[in-house]
Image: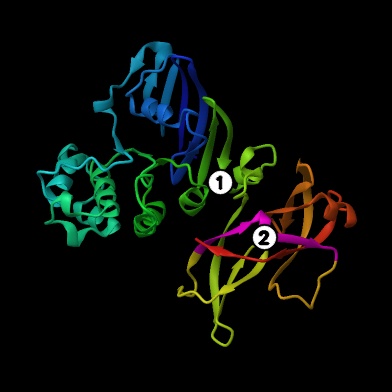
Amino acid sequence: MSTLQGRFQLQQGEFTLDIDFQTPSQGITALFGPSGSGKTTLLRCLAGLERAKPGFLEINGNCWQDESRGFFLPTHQRSLGYVFQEASLFSHLSVRKNLEYGQSRTPQKQRKVAFEEAVELLGISPLLTRNPKRLSGGERQRVAIARALLTSPKLLLMDEPLAALDANSKAEIMPYLEKLHQALSIPVLYISHAIPEVMHIADNMLLIEKGQLIGSGPLLEVLTRLDLPLSHSSEAGVVIEATVTEHDETFHLTYLTFSGGRLSLRREDLAIGSTVRVVLNARDVSLALDNEIHSSILNNFQASILEILEESPGQLIIKLDISGALLLARITTKSGVLLNLQIGMKVYARVKSVALL
């Protein structure tokens, strides 16, 4: 499998970055952690804006840094795109001219992303003649991402690209980030503080705390590790990719299938056969020993208990297996005692709410 590998040690005042990671060089890898954990510093090391010693960086077998032999490729020689929190567009140029500037940085023979492809991917054709000052925040970020893509990068770095946007602008740009996830073979490292944002677009995750890597791997694996903080947050839950299989016009429901069975949610305008992501929050999952027929909850699954952890006084977090799909449930310790829950037990997981991403 093609990979992105990095090892960096960097001292900045009292802060130390000491990270050794490997992630697939396809799809979107989220860099997640609290403020001050070192996410942006790591991105700057990847870009060559900070020279970590010791330091090593290799993308699909192409070495950009190896301090063991004194090799360091400067930033201007690294084939990368960088998208910041604020879209750094040239205000004296039109959108088209901004994009052409990005494209001009790459020799014609090395261009892998066509102008028309980037424009279509980010939905900015109506904006080409406009000045950046006349764009909304979401439109500016879409143009900035398109400009970064037109450099035909081997690596795309995104430092909280939605952080400066309001809720409406975030909702506007999210579908275009989904397209990046689906259409590009360029590896993307994406910093975010928002778990819903990460759940929406990420394939993999690097979880960083105090300059150290504390967890990494496929998104679902990291979200459901009970030894990591994400499974204990108020937003703890799982992401499931499911296929749209049916619309129930009588009851205004949409049915999705996944490895664990069928999910019901309110009627959504989704194409039959399309793949969607849904979130099942741990706080919305209750457990029962019997399959209760007389219940208002439509989503019921037989599950096996994989792990049980008392995460705080009076609360348990439970990791479940539903025919190969993982699920988290947060219940009271009293409920766990009354049900006599044990690892390996068969239970019924009742999902009160399914959130479509």
Percent position of residue 160, x then y = 39, 41
Of 29 and 286, nearer the camera is 286
Q: Which mark is residue 295?
A: none
**Residue 285 falls within the magenta-colored stretch:** yes
**Residue at the disc numbered 1:** 219
Q: Secondary structure at mark 1?
A: helix
**Residue at the disc numbered 2:** 284
Of 59 and 95, nearer the camera is 95
**Quarter of the rendering containing residue 129:** bottom left
Display coloring: rainbow
- Upstream in the sequence, badge 2 or badge 1? 1
- Amino acid at pointer 1: Leu
In the image, residue 11 above or below residue 106: above
Q: Which residues are magenta?
A: 276-289
In the image, what residue occupies the spot 77% across and 49% down? 306
From the viewer's perspective, tell me whether residue 264 is left or right of residue 244. Answer: right
Q: From the image, give the main secondary structure of the stretch colored magenta.
A: strand
In the image, residue 199 above or below residue 14: below
From the viewer's perspective, tell me whether residue 259 is left or right of residue 163. Answer: right
Q: Secondary structure at mark 2?
A: helix
- Amino acid at pointer 2: Asp
CA gap between label 2 and label 1 equals 20 Å
